[in-house]
Amino acid sequence: MGVEVPKIDFKKIDGSSPGYYAICAIWLIICLIGVYAYYLQWIHGEQLTGLNNQVPWGFGIAAVCYLIGASAGSLIVSALSGVFEKEEFKIFSRSAAFFAAAMIVAAMGAIFTDIGNPANSINFLIHFNPTSIFSWNAFLYSSYFVVCVVYLLAQFEDKKFLTRCIAVFAVGWAVLVHSGTGGIVGFVYSNDFYHSSLTPPLFIVSAIASGLGLLIPTYILTFKWTKREYDLDLLWTLTKIMGAMVILLIYCFIVEGFEKGYMPASHEAFLRMITSPETPEVYVYWIGQIGLMLLALAIMLSPFRKREWAIMTASLLVAVAVFCERYTLIVPGLSYPYEILPGYEVVKPFHIVPYYPSWTEWAIVLGLFAGAYLAYCIGIKIFALLPEKAVKIEKGEVRK
Amino acid sequence: MISRRKFLVLVTAGAATIATGKALSLGEEKEKYTSELSEYKWGMVIDVDKCTKCVTEIMKKEGIDDIEKVRPPCIVECDKANNVPQSDKYYYSLIRLYMVKETEDANPLVFPVMCQECEHPACVEVCLTQASYKREDGIIVIDLHRCIGCRYCMIACPYNARRFLWEDPKELLKVVNPEAPVRKHGVVMKCEFCLWKIDRERAENKEPKPVCVEACPYNALIFGNLKDPNSEISKILKTSKVLTLRAYLGTNPKVKYKLWGD
């Protein structure tokens, strides 16, 4: 006598309502504004950005880290049922995997739009540098996309054993991809702000938090707008996982902060970064990163925590806070000049260079986000990604 | 109408081809050969006292307080010869002057900092496309046809010695030196010890000298072959006390700073 395995019906959305087309149109318009901004940057060069020779990385690279993180986080959510045998989360497995693939494409788009000489970008593929962690990542990102699609394909074909095997592999690959991305920053030994072995694991934690931060509101709105029955308890469970990640992140910030503040060579720079309003980073750090995370935690611990609006707000706050975290990871270490000639009391020139992203940088990054969401909107219409009912399926219940 | 299955198979196959191509390129082994360049290891010793004298004199003479506005002959000639654009918005000069003091009222020291031509260069280590590479004579070069302008090398450089061309340099160049590379916007540039000049002079059996060395009125910059024990630079390094910038990083620069007189 065989055990009855719960079966979930995945169905395409109808996607013929004016609301659906309106949402797609909004994403498309943001995307087109991004394309236009990139066209201007292509013509006039990166002088259109707020970057300079002291702060050569900024908003674009923060977006690269964020999008890769969101992708890795989504894939981990997708694999919850396959790897951790949390069957109740199987309803999210297809759409989260698709979202992960869309996000990694957007991340690669963010790299492409940030480089100064995109005409030479094919050299990514032709000239591999084994000592460059970024070069390894270029390989990891493209292969990660393949893993996402294969994983999705295995799910479409309903190959259970294969799906489980790929899920295990995909989670491992996602961890590798994101650790590698953390390594791009953490292995830079010339900059005390960057150099940290904590960065790769911190990236994994941020990835799960931001992935969930984007997925939870996306799911709630998708299920509401497509009139699908859904179980808020399942999303609350995801919110709790996100909350745990936020606590872990705050713990990592404290450890990292103490470590940076402890060393006399860097404590002045660190204190100035978190206290001095010379650059906007101080606001991004206290309001964007720490403030929003604490607010999200407060909502998650409040008596209204299981309400739909509370779950959505907390998730969105975490999604934004993680972006701010990526920003404070990239920018302050460059805004504050590192000491080329240590040991002297007075060093000139010594400029703390404030960096303000230009409208083109905002437009390109928002365009990439919009592109990923447009792909999601189209994806749920042409592929059977969403469950007919997003509710917990009891063992033994078989759906036709 | 293409089926869902076929669509996904095609997308996967395409992406897999790219990923595999990338992975296969790992196995490519480059044929190693040595050229006559391997007989050289170019280095530079900078006499900080002389540089300080030159720069403070210019500051006094021209009434300049800001070290960043001082343009000694080494910087002026370097910019001209290497097609370095002059911009009000960005600092592109390949040499940057740093003025340091033990205390606010102490006598200053001036350090001209350019690419330190490290033995273990962080920029070469991180370059995605091997556009930055070390020649056999130790000069770190940027292949402009390979550079994708990702600026990771600038992030990794411990000496802030690299510049990214944010603007189109052609619009900012008054005179173009056809011998030196003319770059386009979106790539990174740095001091390469005027390799276009030293290679020519080496071929002409002359003593090679970068432009800044020739332009220096105080003979403060000593350039030479570190592999030749009889070169002036080798002799200075044997007898003088020199400073290496950020030596603790282990990059082992080939530009040294002489702080004390003979």
Image (tube, grey):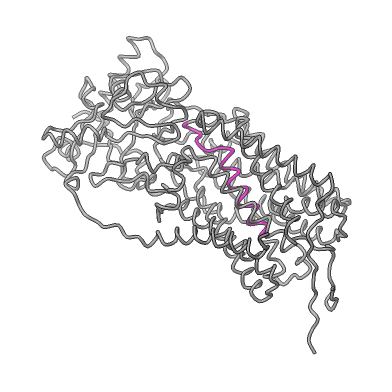
Residue B237 falls left or right of residue A240: left
Residue A152 falls left or right of residue B164: right
Q: Going by the picture, which residue comes out furthest to the front?
A: B1
Viewer-proximal residue among B103 and A185: A185
Identify the residue at horizontal 53%, vertical 36% (top origin).
Answer: A269
Residue A342, visible in the rendered structure: no
Viewer-proximal residue among B91 and A160: A160
Identify the residue at horizontal 60%, vertical 51% (top origin).
Answer: A105
Q: Is residue A71 magenta?
A: yes
Q: How many numbered circles are shown? A: 0
Relative image position of residue A47 (x, y in whole percent): 51, 28
Q: Quadrant of residue B66?
A: top left
Main secondary structure found in the magenta portion: helix
The quadrant of the picture occupied by the C terminus of chain B is top left
Residue A230, visible in the rendered structure: yes
Give the residues drawn in magenta, as a range: A53-75
Q: Going by the picture, which residue comes out furthest to the bottom?
A: A1
A132 shown above or below A2: above
Relative image position of residue A29 (x, y in whole percent): 71, 37
Relative image position of residue B76 (x, y in whole percent): 31, 20
Identify the residue at horizontal 30%, vertical 14% (top origin).
Answer: B57
A246 shown above or below B232: below
Q: Is residue B255 magenta?
A: no
Residue A196 falls left or right of residue A240: left
